[in-house]
Image (cartoon, helix red, strand yellow):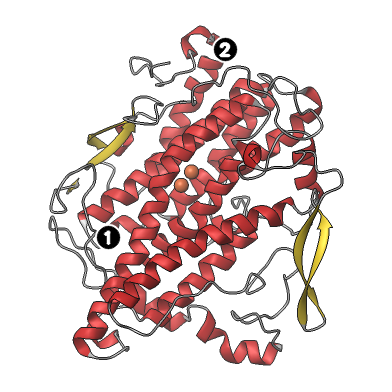
Amino acid sequence: MAIDYAERIPNNVNLADNRRLQRALESWQPKFQDWWMEMGPEGFQANEIYLRTAVSVDSDGWAHFDFVKMPEYRWGIFLAEPEADRAVNFGQHMGDPAWQEVPGEYRGMLRRIIVTQGDTEPASVEQQRQLGRTSPSLYDLRNLFQVNVEEGRHLWAMVYLLDAHFGRDGREEAEALLMRRSGDADKPRILGAFNEATPDWLSFYMFTYFTDRDGRFQLASLAESGFDPLSRTCRFMLTEEAHHMFVGETGVGRVAQRSCELMNEHDTDDLRPHGGIDLAILQKYINFHFSVSLDLFGGELSTNAANYFTSGLKGRFREIQIDDDHVLSDGTYRVIEPAQNAFTETDAPALTSLNERLRDAYIADCQRGLDRWNKVIAQHDIDFTFALPHRAFHRAIGLFSGLRISPAGEVVTQDEWDRRVDDWLPSDQDRAYVRSLMEPVTSPGLMANWIAAPARGINGQPIEFEYTKL
Ligand SMILES: [Fe+2]
Ligand SMILES: [Fe+2]
């Protein structure tokens, strides 16, 4: 199943054999291009960027690196190889052959799942469209654009499913995905975190660490789907997604490293006079992006989540590795709930607590990056550790929404919240300061003062490689 680049739309789904689908996608393609020119990275559409393009879906050696202008990037449709004799692996249809067509009774649910995932892809491109003007290095600029073109490709991946399997409704949804706008009051993107601004590069690294990681867990759950085309689509998207989280993890790590260097050099933890970002500000950004991303998993107890699972549409993280009946009709799961100025753990039905279970897996995975960042701080002999805030902190969705909880997990009064919120979340002043540092650095190999150089370049190239030709 090689990818055919001779086609107008590169693909490994034999698009040429399906004229109806080919026509639908070819009529969507120019609308996508228009959207990219209007809402894609501002100011760099004519520049040559060192980007990777998928040339196969093999786990090793799937990418080709070369200079390309973003509007000429070959967005295409790539599904992971089919697994022979794949079955529905959970829910009430467990053991049936995996579906190649949408089961009629689940059409509405499945469309909603695909549209919700698809909507996040162009949203993040829109959120990040101004960042190119202030990038801390050509290396980072290239990474931003790599993430952007791949989010564009993820949109293609979801639009393919809509056009291939949902007829006229699917085509309408595909158009609507290009009409909504991140942060727009009248036609916002579907999920909250995708309407937040990404105003500076620190926010970008935090977003790719925390919010792209939500994407990873959602995609991993959808990769378990009994609807085989969705599973195969998501499996290949996960391959690309790994780089996005690498950008986030190494980005925050490099900022922390530079802060430590400046602290030791000047023997102070107040880095403003030295053009660095205080570790305390980094912690506040962590608090913000982690809490906003937790909301993306939805309510702790959710009948939607239960229905998605029972129907065989959306599994758990690494479903087939879990040792249970994969039906969950009488299992339980430990859920933390608010109770009278504190929290309590209850055994909730496993089926309705699937969102919380996925959130738990996500939290554990987030902690791993913090551990690595903390190691960087310790290597500099600095007495400071990053911590994830309590899951109830700053939540807008689920059982904790509307409560006032400190990052340490204490219930606080509204007064106390108001008094201390600037210690817990980035204040206007913090954000203005971080913004003030955002001056573009455009000489190959040079880095802005507030961030350390990466450990290595991209695709074996040196750090001083000219990743973006300005
Ligand atoms: Fe994506
Ligand atoms: Fe991503």
- Residue 42 seen in the current view: no
Q: Element under label 2? A: helix
Within 8 Å: ligand 1 and the Cβ of disc 2?
no
Does 466 sit left or right of 156 as displayed? left
Give the label on residue 109, or none: none
Earlier residue among tags 1 and 2: 2
Give the label on residue 135, or none: 1
What residue is disc 2 on?
Answer: 20
Give 165 or 364, whichever is nearer the viewer. 364
Q: Position of residue 311 (x, y in %)?
A: 78, 34
User: In percent of the image, x 64 and y 28: which residue is there?
Assistant: 170
Does 403 sit left or right of 284 as displayed? right
Q: Position of residue 156 (x, y in %)?
A: 49, 32
Q: Is residue 349 above or below residue 199?
A: above
Residues under numbered marks 1 and 2 in contact, where contact means CB atoms less than 8 Å apart: no
Locate residue 151: give its quadrant. top left
Residue type indicated by callout 1: Ser
Of marks 1 and 2, the one in the foreground: 1
Q: Is residue 311 above or below residue 421?
A: above
Residue type indicated by callout 2: Arg
User: In percent of the image, x 44 and y 44: which residue is there?
Assistant: 241
Q: Element under label 1? A: loop
- Sort mark 2 into few (<14), some (14-19) or many (20+) by Cα contacts within 10 Å: some
Does 83 sit left or right of 441 as displayed? right
- Sort mark 1 into few (<14), some (14-19) or many (20+) by Cα contacts within 10 Å: many
